[in-house]
Image: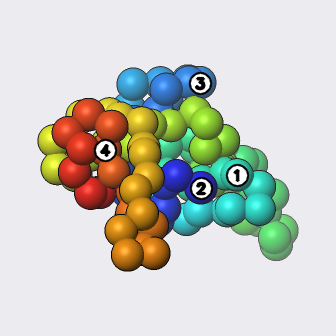
Amino acid sequence: MKVKKGDLVLITAGKDKGRTGKILKSLPKELKILVEGINFKKKHVRPKREGEKGQVVEIPAALNVSNVKLICSKCGKATRVGYTVDKDIKKRICKKCKQEV
Ligand SMILES: [Zn+2]
């Protein structure tokens, strides 16, 4: 996973294309992420008791990680992520400004 929880990402595909949001949760096994305010799906909830009204709730749906681009915290641009290894520690770097992100 090139992005992780707390990263700011740009959505590059789907109905929220062009929007940005923070990653709330990453699901590495499924290569999916949940992004704040992005990809909400409406779900109808049936009344639990008689006399209650049904509700429509919005639930965030996970996005495929390939549909987002990291926004670099250093230069603020949507970028691809590279890696460098420094003293056996793997670091993410921004492909645009070459700084660690
Ligand atoms: Zn950068």
The amino acid at mark 3 is: Gly
The amino acid at mark 2 is: Met
3D distance between C-alphas at marks 1 and 4: 20 Å
Image point 33% across, 37% down: which residue?
95
Asked if labels 2 and 1 touch by Cβ distance under 8 angstroms, the answer is: yes
The amino acid at mark 1 is: Leu
For disc 4, the marked residue is 94
Q: Nearer the viewer, mark 3 or mark 2?
A: 2
3D distance between C-alphas at marks 4 and 3: 24 Å
3D distance between C-alphas at marks 3 and 2: 20 Å
For disc 1, the marked residue is 31
For disc 3, the marked residue is 14
Q: Nearer the viewer, residue 3 or 87?
A: 87
Asked if labels 3 and 4 touch by Cβ distance under 8 angstroms, the answer is: no
3D distance between C-alphas at marks 2 and 4: 15 Å
Q: Nearer the viewer, mark 1 or mark 2?
A: 2
For disc 2, the marked residue is 1
Give the residue at the far left of this rendering.
75
User: Is 73 situated left or right of 25 in this image?
Assistant: left
Asked if labels 4 and 2 touch by Cβ distance under 8 angstroms, the answer is: no
Specify whether tag 4 is near ligand 1 (CB below 8 Å): yes
User: Is 75 situated left or right of 100 in this image?
Assistant: left
Q: In the figure, residue 70 lies in which quadrant?
A: top left
Which is nearer the N-term, disc 4 or disc 3? 3
Q: How many numbered dots are placed on residues in this image? A: 4
Q: Nearer the viewer, residue 32 or 72?
A: 72
Q: In the figure, residue 53 lies in which quadrant?
A: bottom right
Q: Is residue 8 above or below residue 41?
A: below
